[in-house]
Amino acid sequence: MILGISHITFIVKDLDKAATFFEEIFEAKEVYSSGDKTFSISKEKFFLINNLWIAVMEGEKIEKSYNHIAFKINESDYEMYLERIEKLGLEIKSGRKRVIEEGNSIYFYDYDNHLFELHTGTLETRLLRYQKEYMG
């Protein structure tokens, strides 16, 4: 039985730059740094984002794609997050066309081409909207 997500790992070119990204955007708390040691496949750092374990490991930058991870945010925090992203000079990707019931999203790339989304909607509201579309 799956109990939930254990952790999410991102391969990054620069661990310190990745630390800045996670700390500034997500208020992540660094809980481990391997320093020059390599216990896994490369140097790494661990962070907590609201009890979600994020691992970053040194490696090569990836190609951009639509594969992404979406974090839930409150609508009232949308502008605050947008300012954080802009302050770091990150690339913001135009979102897909949406209907109001789906909520708002900010899509942005980190320094290593990982795509993130900050989303104000929920699965329930999206399914209700899709159901209306198909039935109406």
Image (spheres, rainbow, N blue to C red):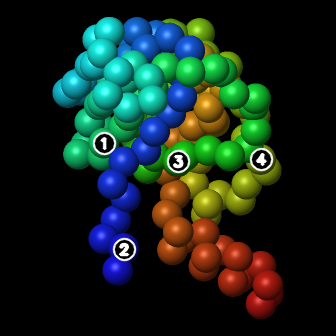
Instruction: Say whether marks 4 and 2 touch (CB < 8 Å).
Output: no
Q: Is residue 81 rendered to the left or right of residue 23?
A: right
Residue at left offset 30%, top offset 15%: 37
Disc with the residue nearer the chain's start (3 vs 4): 3
Residue 23 visible in the picture = no
Real-space Cα separation, disc 4 to disc 2, in angstroms: 31 Å
| 4 vs 1, front mark | 1
Disc with the residue nearer the chain's start (3 vs 2): 2
Residue 97 visible in the picture = yes
Residue at left offset 49%, top offset 20%: 58
Find residue 125 and report its horizontal and vertical position in percent. Answer: 54, 70
Give the amino acid at mark 2. Answer: Ile
- Tell me if mark 3 has few (under 14), some (14-19) or many (20+) residues whose alpha carbon lies within 10 angstroms of its own: some
Disc with the residue nearer the chain's start (4 vs 1): 1
Q: Is residue 128 rendered to the left or right of residue 2?
A: right
Disc with the residue nearer the chain's start (1 vs 2): 2
Among the 4 quarters of the image, the one containing residue 112: top right
What's the mark number on residue 70? 3
Q: Which residue is mark 4?
A: 96
| 4 vs 2, front mark | 2
Q: Which residue is mark 2?
A: 2
Q: Choose between 128 and 33: the one closer to the eye.
A: 33
Q: Which residue is mark 1?
A: 53
Q: Is residue 28 above or below residue 134?
A: above
Real-space Cα separation, disc 3 to disc 2, in angstroms: 20 Å
Callout 4: SS: loop
Real-space Cα separation, disc 1 to disc 2, in angstroms: 16 Å
Find residue 93 and report its horizontal and vertical position in percent. Answer: 72, 30
